[in-house]
């Protein structure tokens, strides 16, 4: 029976990896977590006069660079100038060159959302009338292609490494102390540490290209790496590496000093279930208790810190109730690790633990309690996270995030059902062990009586085991081998016999491990549970790369509202006023532009731009604004904008008390004695 297990296990593992790969490949990396909710000019709009700037509004704050927003004329030439500015909130604007001719213009943007994911897109607007355009903006963003795939794979490996590292260590400390001496379990936990460390380094190197060009050649660009280190995501990755150094020390103590105390001087073959020891030594020893407590406390702190490196840079750090969502996310990740990582360690122990240190009923029961607590924690934290990310029942079916969440819930339900079967096998395993022990005792007693009856008077008593003849033959063979080796004859043959005996002993141990049908059933159910866990982890990784349902629905609502306002003519949007000026002195000529957004009663953002005759931004000693509503005898209301950069002044929360035809006066001073006041009227509200 055992000869057919390995091919089946390999087949199942390959199937699981294929499904996980399909899920990862099916994740649309471009579906990030900030959405474009509006623009001025609006998408597809036709404006009568050329605007002085293009403004983009997103669902959350984003990071912009020099080329984050590009405006291209019908021939594909760039007509934007300067670095995109953020006057406040989630609106970002880029200035346009003056004197733009009629035609269709393309706006392409590529920014990074506050929860670390790149956002790219494009739209068009027209001046005067639509025209043909030669611009063809690629739909592929920086997170598509090879770099995007590698980054997504790195995220999956980092989650898997954390789960195996934290969950495997928790399984040893909380459920099965003798596992600290089992090489297969040691290799599992160390492999988790190596996977998480390698994935974190890879993500750090890929991050710059992932959020900018998307080119594989930029992965080793040290300038991009320096920029990444100054971002929130870069800081989180570096913090994770530092915590992994502490995790390495934890692993060394766990499989060093703790493994020695886990032995406790007791025989390796101590009876399972005897006082719940599972082969452990005296659990009441003060040194062991202190070491266990210290490892548990230190391991929890390190694991929580590693989990926080995700929470501080992804979904939980942005949006609704971020102060509550981040610790909830940490607890959620720890529960996932305890359940799935502990399950992986249990699977390895069931298949690879030596017969001298078997996994008994008590260890499985302790893990069952740990898994139950983890599932309850996942349910509570998952409900909160679902409400926070979805916001409505309809988002379950109307958004991709909600659909993936339904798949995740279904997989969790399957895992819980399989875990219930595992509990039944555990109980049968305990019953079978009692029955087998009784049968073995009866067989031993019968064998002893039979040997006593067969032996002649004065003969030495036989061994109290059914395998005495085999033991004597093995001892005789050993003696014969030793004599030949001492005599110097046939040393090669002696080495071959030694290897054969070692192989025979290994095969015997494997047969003993696989003989119990109940243990075989437990292994199969745990293997199935672990297979579902791999797919569940893949779906979770995809969820972290998918735009939350709440954000997606809000963006759709904002887009629909903007389109409706544009169609009915009820929305006013921002107002841009351009006025030439001449102070009469040297270098006294130029153009001043005033932008008011949203040009409604209440708070408004005001921007002032001063350009020379050639269209380049210039600084002047002073710019003042005054607003007057003559029909209601209001004003002039003074506004003193702050200098932002060359040729740019701004003021936030400019209060306009009511709608009407307001006169906007701009005073420009170019020297100590040269100044002029120009004005235009603007319809507010």
Image: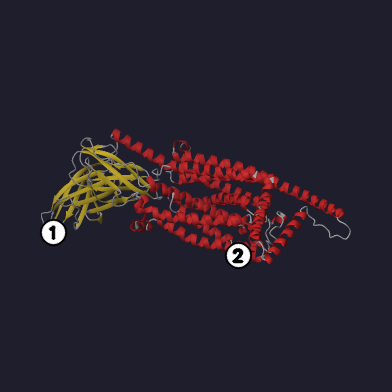
SS label for mark 1: loop
Quadrant position of residue 672: bottom left
Q: Which sits earlier in the primary sequence, circle 2 or circle 1?
A: 2
Whether residue 293 is visible to the viewer of this picture, yes or no, is yes
> Where is mark 2, residue-wise?
257
- Find disc 1 in the rendering and name its residue: 673
| x, y percent for residue 212 | 34, 50
Relative to 617, say whether 660 is above or below.
above
Residue 631 position, x and y percent, is: 22, 42
Instruction: Using the image, determine if residue 557 lies above or below residue 654.
Output: above
Residue 522 image position (x, y, % from top left): 65, 45
Q: Can residue 324 be seen in this view?
A: no
Viewer-closest of 636 and 359: 359
Q: What element carries label 2?
A: helix
Quadrant position of the C terminus in the picture: top left
Check residue 304 in the rendering and tell me which mark sits there, or answer none. Answer: none
From the image, which quarter does the N terminus lie in? top right
The front one of 52 and 245 is 245
* Quadrant hosting residue 27: top left
> Relative to residue 81, is residue 408 drawn left or right?
right
Q: Is residue 480 above or below residue 103?
A: below
Count of numbered tags:
2
Q: How crowded is mark 1: few (under 14 residues within 10 Å), some or many (20 or more)?
A: few
């Amino acid at each position: 029976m055992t000869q057919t297990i390995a091919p089946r296990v390999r087949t199942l593992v390959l199937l699981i990896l294929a499904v996980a790969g399909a899920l990862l490949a099916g994740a649309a990396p471009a579906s990030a977590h900030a959405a474009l909710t509006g623009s001025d000019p609006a998408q597809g709009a036709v404006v009568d006069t050329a605007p002085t700037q293009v403004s983009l509004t997103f669902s959350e704050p984003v990071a912009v660079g020099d080329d984050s927003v590009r405006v291209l004329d019908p021939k594909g030439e760039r007509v934007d100038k300067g670095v995109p500015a953020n006057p406040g909130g989630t609106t970002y604007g880029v200035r346009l060159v003056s004197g733009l001719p009629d035609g269709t213009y393309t706006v392409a943007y590529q920014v990074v959302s506050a929860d670390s994911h790149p956002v790219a897109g494009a739209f068009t607007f027209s001046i005067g009338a639509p025209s043909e355009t030669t611009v063809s903006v690629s739909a592929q963003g920086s997170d598509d292609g090879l770099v995007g795939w590698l980054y997504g794979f790195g995220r999956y490996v980092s989650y898997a490494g954390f789960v195996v590292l934290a969950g495997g260590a928790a399984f040893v400390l909380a459920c099965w102390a003798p596992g600290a001496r089992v090489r297969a379990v040691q290799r599992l936990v160390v492999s988790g540490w190596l996977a998480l460390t390698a994935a974190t380094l890879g993500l750090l190197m890929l991050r710059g290209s992932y959020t900018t060009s998307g080119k594989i050649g930029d992965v080793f660009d040290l300038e991009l790496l320096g920029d990444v280190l100054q971002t929130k995501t870069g800081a989180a990755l570096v913090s994770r590496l530092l915590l992994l150094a502490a995790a390495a020390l934890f692993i060394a103590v766990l499989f060093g000093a703790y493994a020695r105390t886990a032995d406790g001087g007791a025989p390796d073959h101590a009876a399972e279930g005897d006082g719940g020891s599972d082969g452990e030594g005296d659990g009441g020893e003060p040194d062991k208790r202190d070491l266990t407590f210290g490892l548990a406390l230190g391991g929890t702190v390190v694991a929580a810190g590693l989990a926080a490196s995700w929470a501080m840079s992804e979904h939980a750090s942005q949006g609704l109730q971020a102060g509550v969502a981040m610790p909830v996310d940490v607890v959620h990740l720890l529960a996932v690790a305890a359940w799935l990582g502990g399950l992986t360690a249990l699977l390895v122990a069931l298949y690879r633990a030596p017969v001298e240190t078997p996994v008994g009923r008590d260890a499985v029961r302790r893990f069952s309690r740990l898994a139950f607590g983890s599932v309850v924690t996942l349910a509570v934290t998952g409900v909160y996270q679902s409400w926070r990310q979805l916001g409505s029942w309809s988002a379950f079916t109307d958004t991709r995030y909600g659909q993936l969440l339904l798949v995740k819930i279904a997989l969790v339900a399957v895992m819980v059902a399989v875990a219930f079967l595992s509990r039944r096998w555990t109980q049968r395993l305990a019953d079978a062990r009692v029955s087998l022990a009784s049968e073995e005792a009866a067989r031993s007693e019968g064998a002893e009586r039979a040997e006593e009856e067969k032996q002649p008077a004065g003969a030495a008593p036989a061994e109290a085991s059914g395998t005495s003849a085999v033991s004597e033959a093995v001892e005789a063979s050993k003696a014969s081998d030793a004599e030949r080796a001492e005599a110097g004859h046939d040393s090669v043959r002696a080495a071959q016999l030694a290897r054969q005996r070692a192989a025979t002993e290994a095969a015997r141990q494997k047969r003993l491990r696989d003989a119990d049908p109940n243990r075989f059933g437990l292994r199969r159910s745990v293997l199935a549970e672990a297979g579902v866990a791999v797919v569940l982890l893949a779906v979770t990784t995809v969820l972290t790369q998918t735009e939350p349902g709440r954000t997606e629905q809000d963006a759709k609502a904002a887009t629909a509202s903007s389109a409706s306002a544009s169609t009915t003519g009820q929305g006013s949007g921002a107002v841009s006023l351009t006025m030439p000026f001449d102070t009469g002195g040297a270098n006294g000529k130029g153009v001043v532009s005033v932008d008011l957004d949203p040009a409604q009663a209440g708070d408004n953002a005001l921007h002032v731009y001063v350009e020379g005759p050639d269209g380049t931004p210039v600084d002047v000693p002073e710019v003042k604004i005054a607003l007057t509503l003559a029909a209601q005898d209001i004003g002039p209301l003074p506004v003193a904008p702050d200098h932002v950069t060359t040729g740019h002044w701004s003021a936030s929360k400019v209060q306009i008390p009511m709608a009407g035809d307001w006169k906007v006066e701009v005073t420009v001073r170019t020297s100590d004695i040269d100044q002029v006041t120009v004005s235009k009227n603007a319809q507010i509200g």
